Amino acid sequence: MEIDRVNAVSDDWLALRRALWPETTEAGHRADMAAMVADPARYAVFFSRDDRGVVGFAEASLRTDYVNGCLQSPVVFLEGIFVAPQARRRGVAAALIEAVGDWARGKGVRELASDALIDNLDSHAMHRAVGFSETDRVVYFRKEI
């Protein structure tokens, strides 16, 4: 398995993002990817490759706003992580998160944060398996005015 930092928008990245966030349009994904590539000081994206090609990705950002459960600022936030079903349970997510952690440490950051939907138990288990601790459970509300 290889972990590489992404420095260009690609169809592999798009396919993995669409698998993770199917509700987002292709144009929306491409705009987000272009913004990340254009600002490598704030964003880092990593691919995991094996003999079949790209099998996973992780996107991270440097956040200076308050991040729930964190004690410091700035924080590196794991914005998204996805491993193709056929590559799961082989250490891919752990390797991707280690790459994100290396990037964070290189920026002098000491906390890595993430989130998951409250009903995404697979994501909760993955986060715990790679060393995250749960800090909060939140339900967001909205009202049109």
Image (tube, helix red, strand yellow):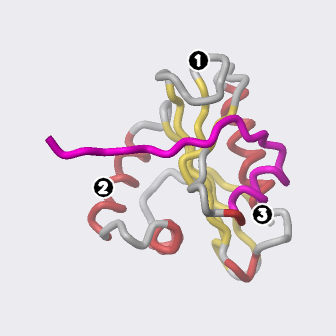
Q: Quadrant of residue 29?
A: bottom left
In the picture, the quarter occupied by the N terminus is: bottom right
Which residue is at a point 80% across and 54% down the rendered structure image? 94
Give amino acid for label 1.
Ser
Residue 102 in the image: x percent, y percent?
74, 36
The dot on residue 92 is 3
Q: Are marks 3 and 1 in contact (CB under 8 Å)?
A: no
Question: Which residue is nearer to you in this view: 56 or 75?
Answer: 75
x and y percent of residue 129 in the render? Answer: 85, 54
Which residue is tagged 1?
73
> Where residue 122 appears, x then y in whole percent?
71, 66
How many residues crowd around disc 3 within 10 Å: few (fewer than 14), some, or many (20 or more)?
Answer: many
Residue beneath the point at 75% across and 76% down = 87
Image: magenta residue range: 123-145
Mark 1 or 2, nearer chain start: 2
25 is higher (above) or lower (below) than 58: below
Q: Identify the mark at residue 31; answer none if there is no mark.
A: 2
Q: Was residue 77 drawn as part of the magenta stretch in this picture?
A: no
